[in-house]
Amino acid sequence: MADIKLKDLRYLVAVADTRHFGKAAERCFVSQPTLSAQLRKLEEYLGVVLVERQPRQALLTPAGAEIVARARRIVEASDEVVEIARTHRDPLAGRLRIAFLPTIGPYLLPGIAPRLHKALPRLELMFYEYQTAPMLERLHAGDIDMGVLALPVGLDGLVAQPLYDEPFVVAAPARHPLAARKEVRIEDLRGVTLLLLEEGHCLRDQALDVCNRVAVQENQNFRATSIETLRQMVAVDAGVTLLPELATRGAYATARGVVVRPFAKPAPVRRIGAIWRKSSPRTAALTAITRLIAEHAL
């Protein structure tokens, strides 16, 4: 086993993730012939075929899939060894990869990113957007260091830190009866045509949970891919939607044709939190980031 090189395992994981030798080579910063040749040598050493090579894609064989699962853990452990050493030198320095839900990132980052850079200048912060399921996959795989998303989620091997509770608000067309109210009760949504995000967005499920006590009519002919699409559809009088409060502030506070009204207290909220691996050596930096987000998000 001493002949297995860590870089070869990285190549194999990259092929598994991209299903393409060229893309895997780009990800590993090597030429495609180099990556392919190294994987051939790995297959010869192990005596099994790991990758089924096709003209336009690369698929793992059953043996390859089993070995990749273990290779990921080895690669992750190797990265953690480096991070542990770096953390002991300077806990608040180095690169951190943070992912946000698409319904959080665009509205939270403009206010919080400058504060993070000012308070933690030695950290190189890289920001990404993923929905909940791929975010959890990438977190477990070691591709990101922290995720910011709506809680609760499954925490197998992860730790969660609540950040803030974000109220929902009602966004209605300017001529809709709800627009004339100062605040909206959940019962006022009875019979309203509600615009929602497509399947896979947790915001869709949260909006349905808020309205589960009344007979809300979902627009069956429309599924939005983003909050901005929802906002534009409200503006053209296609229906009413629920938005997280941060999505109605700043540059988004004056969308033409859209009137935003708060819910009567107690307003429904979604809990936003940060999650990371229990084994992460970057706990000090991650804790510092979560503290700043919690203090300045709302």
Image (tube, rainbow, N blue to C red):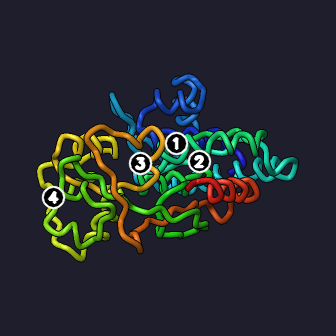
Q: Secondary structure at mark 2?
A: strand
Residue corresponding to mark 4: 193
- What residue appears at the point 41 percent right and 48 percent down from the top-left corner? 248
Q: Position of residue 187 (x, y in %)?
A: 23, 73
Circle on res. 280: none
Marks 2 & 1, CB-CB < 8 Å contact: yes
Q: CA distance from mark 3 to mark 2?
A: 23 Å
Query: Which of the two discs, 4 and 3, labels the residue nearer the N terminus?
Result: 4
Q: Secondary structure at mark 3?
A: helix
The residue lying toward the viewer, choosing from 137 and 182, is 182
Q: CA distance from mark 2 to mark 1?
A: 6 Å
Q: CA distance from mark 1 to mark 4?
A: 33 Å
Query: Which of the two discs, 1 and 4, labels the residue nearer the N terminus?
Result: 1
- What residue appears at the point 72 percent right and 48 percent down from the top-left corner? 2
Q: Is residue 203 left or right of residue 213?
A: right
Q: Secondary structure at mark 4?
A: strand
- The mark closer to the camera, 4 or 2, is 4
Q: Residues within 10 Å of mark 1 (few under 14, many from 20)?
A: some
The residue lying toward the viewer, choosing from 98 and 296, is 296
- The mark closer to the camera, 4 or 3, is 3
| Above or below, comparing residue 235 to residue 268 in the picture | above
| Above or below, comparing residue 214 to residue 55 in the picture | below
Circle on res. 98: 2
